[in-house]
Image (spheres, coloured by chain):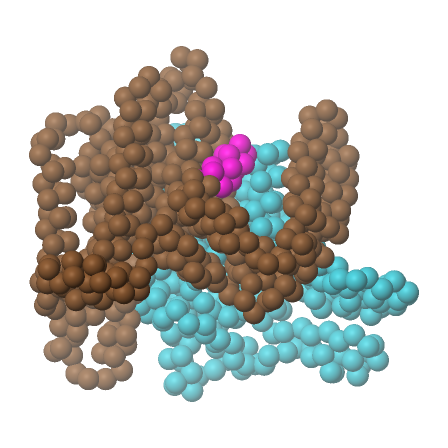
Amino acid sequence: MDILNALVAFLNFVFIPAATYGAQLALGALGVTLIYGILRFSNFAHGDTMAFGTAITIMVTWGLQALGISLSPLPTALLALPVGIAATALVVLGTDRVVYRFYRVQKAAPIILVMASVGVMFLMNGLTRLLIGVDEIRFDDGARFIINVRDFREWTGLQEGLALRTTQVLTLVVAVLVVWALFWFLNRTKSGKAMRAYSDNEDLALLSGIDPEKVVRMTWIIAAGLATIAGVLYGLDKSFKAFNYFQILLPIFAAAIVGGLGNPLGAIAGGFVVAFSEVAITYPWAKVAGYLFPDWQPDGLLQLLGTEYKFAVSFVILIIVLLFKPTGLFRGKSV
Amino acid sequence: MATNRQAAATSPWRAPIFFAILAVLFILEGTVRNSMFSGSWNTSLAILNMGLISAITALGVNMQWGYAGLFNVGVVGFIALGGLAPVLVSLPAVEGAWSAGGPRLLLSLLIGLGTLALAKITWMKTRSGWIVAAVLVIGFFVYRWLFDPAVIAIEANNPSRNGNIGGLGLPVLLSWLAGGLFAAIAAWAIGKVALGLRSDYLAIATLGIGEIIVAVLKNEDWLARGVKNITSIPRPVPYEIDLQSNPEFVAFAARWGFGAAEASGIWVKLCYMLLFLVVLLTIILLAELALKSPWGRMMRAIRDNETAAEAMGKDVTGRHLQVFVLGSAVIGIAGAMMITQDGLMAPTGYNPLRYTFLIWVMVIVGGSGNNWGAVLGAVLIWFLWIKVEVWGPTLIGFLVTPLPDGGFKTHLLDSAPHMRFIVMGLVLLLVLRFAPRGLVPEK
């Protein structure tokens, strides 16, 4: 039994990727859950908002690279990120003004807003395709690894290697900072308190003199920021492909619902629940088992589900939560 | 839409006029050759046939949305599931596939379903999460233990040509019904879970089931060869090549002034058109009868005010499940028809933007709640979707002529095909906002 090697393999193939992915999902789910809490509809355009923000960031990154500016050893995209966020916030505020506000004033049924968000999704998708195309793009420059497999083996003398990519550490650090800033904003500032009050009880908030339009604007700006950051981190970690950002919508919704729609803390927990289940269920455990039980020779890869079905995992989690706890683990809003 | 369902008076001539405009567009496409139209009856009829299939899909979506206000975002999954039917029903049996692992495969699938049923019963009886989890885990391992070797054996059977389980060799028209049945079963399962909760939950759950069904079709090679595609699905209509070698047909074509090759294509497409029209009109007839019956009035009452309907003792969730299953079955039939017409099952083609959201644009534009509106919207939007691909680059090319040659101009020219998505998004938003009842509103 070789616990150390097994542990390293587990860290390398399960824990680190799942933690990174979980942080990306959590940021995405935070955006969805905030929009839900304030505007009370599921925003189907969120995935494509992430794609749009990332596309802008990539284009600014290219511009910076052409000028010879870089942030080595960190990826240049970090420098371009504020521009991406600003552009996305502008576009999203524009869609609110032109599309959603009309239905809000009319007090239309939530499902109509969902449908309008599908229209916005189409628009954003087309815009992203127009800007940057449909191909896969890698835009992570700077140092690739903090720890690479060979060095790790030399240091520790273990058979199993461990790689820690810059983008993975970056994702976790940025996510922690963003979440901290968001919670500070929601709990400590006047605007943040206004947002929470509006989310809890719209009429009471109106009576207390909170300007609903201001709250809505703030929500969109924060959601655009979260979406762009999540999108850029995801793109740096994996690669940018517009269609993947549409597909990531399902795990993001699953994360938001698992945590309880409208509950920011729940969205973070939900992100990690979904990510860890997804990675744990699609990872072939044969290697880890081989270290733990050297005498046991399993036939297969000990993989519960092929990686192609990773979306099925989020879906099953979603179904289980819907069946047993429709308000989510952290008591979000329901009905 | 729920806010302004009440009908304002509209001209009774509205629908006929729009259908006439549509007919003119197709005739222009068939006869006039210029930069806007192809002037080929083959192209015109091909667009029309696919438009009719889209119309049937739109009818299914319209049942769910227009009658009951259910937002189904997994249309692509139900279309794909319907498309599986011609493969499993009408293809000839694959030699050696069944003996390689057929019974074992079937048994494993039964055990998989049995496990779920058993888990449900255990939950009802004991309410103990641990026992249910144990049932599921044991069932899963038994299922995999039976399933994996069977799949490996079937996929190893002549993998370059087959490697799939094969079909039953029944007539292909029967598979259209089977496609509806497949989609209905999936819809029942998903509706059972997600209906009765918040309205957005159904949308999110159907989004998931859509992606999963497409993933299954792409990856389960034993089922329909996955991304290796299935070709030569039997046809309910004659083959072009047979018509061309038939002297009577060639003489008949010559009398009308067509070459044999062109005429055979047109003939085949006309045959398909007739079949599709029969299906379309049957579904419309049934749907209209249902809408005018007490059942239809109840559905609309539920849609317009769920609380009131429930207070009147109507089983809202039960009715929703009913109409969701029915609508999905219609979508499944359309999926089977599409694969039959194409003669090819290629799961990579199932893109949600094309097969879910475009169908939604069709329903909204046509007029939700109105069957003729859904048909009109479907054929019209499909025509535009195809033609925008041709018109878009021409338009962009015209718009950018004053720009100096360079990277920006080529970039704009290259990205012209993506204009379709922007146009469709705009159309959806504009109709939703300014004409929420569509071109042909509900009566």
**Nearer the observer, B234 or B386:** B234
In the depicted structure, whether residue A277 falls above or below residue A263:
below
Residue A10 position, x and y percent, is 75, 64
Direction from residue A298 to residue A149 in the image, left or right: left
Residue B72 position, x and y percent, is 41, 41
Question: Which picture quadrant has residue A90?
Answer: bottom left
Which residue is pictured at 66% across the width and 41% down the height? B110
Question: Which picture quadrant has residue A64?
Answer: bottom left
Residue A218 position, x and y percent, is 39, 49
**Nearer the observer, B136 or B222:** B222
Give the overall secondary structure of the magenta segment. Answer: helix
Toward the top, the furthest residue is B312
Per the image, is A91 magenta? no
Question: Which picture quadrant has residue B56?
Answer: top left
In the depicted structure, whether residue B365 falls above or below residue A327:
below
Dividing the image into 4 quarters, which one contains the C terminus of chain B? top left
Per the image, is B191 magenta? yes
Q: Which residues are magenta?
A: B180-193
Which residue is pictured at 73% across the width and 83% down the height? A150
In the depicted structure, whether residue A129 falls above or below residue B179:
below
Dividing the image into 4 quarters, which one contains the N terminus of chain B? top left
Residue B369 position, x and y percent, is 27, 32
Direction from residue A321 to residue A42 in the image, left or right: left
Which residue is pictured at 28% across the width and 71% down the height? B415
Visual hue assigned to chain A = cyan
Visual hue assigned to chain B = brown
Which residue is pictured at 23% across the width and 55% down the height? B267
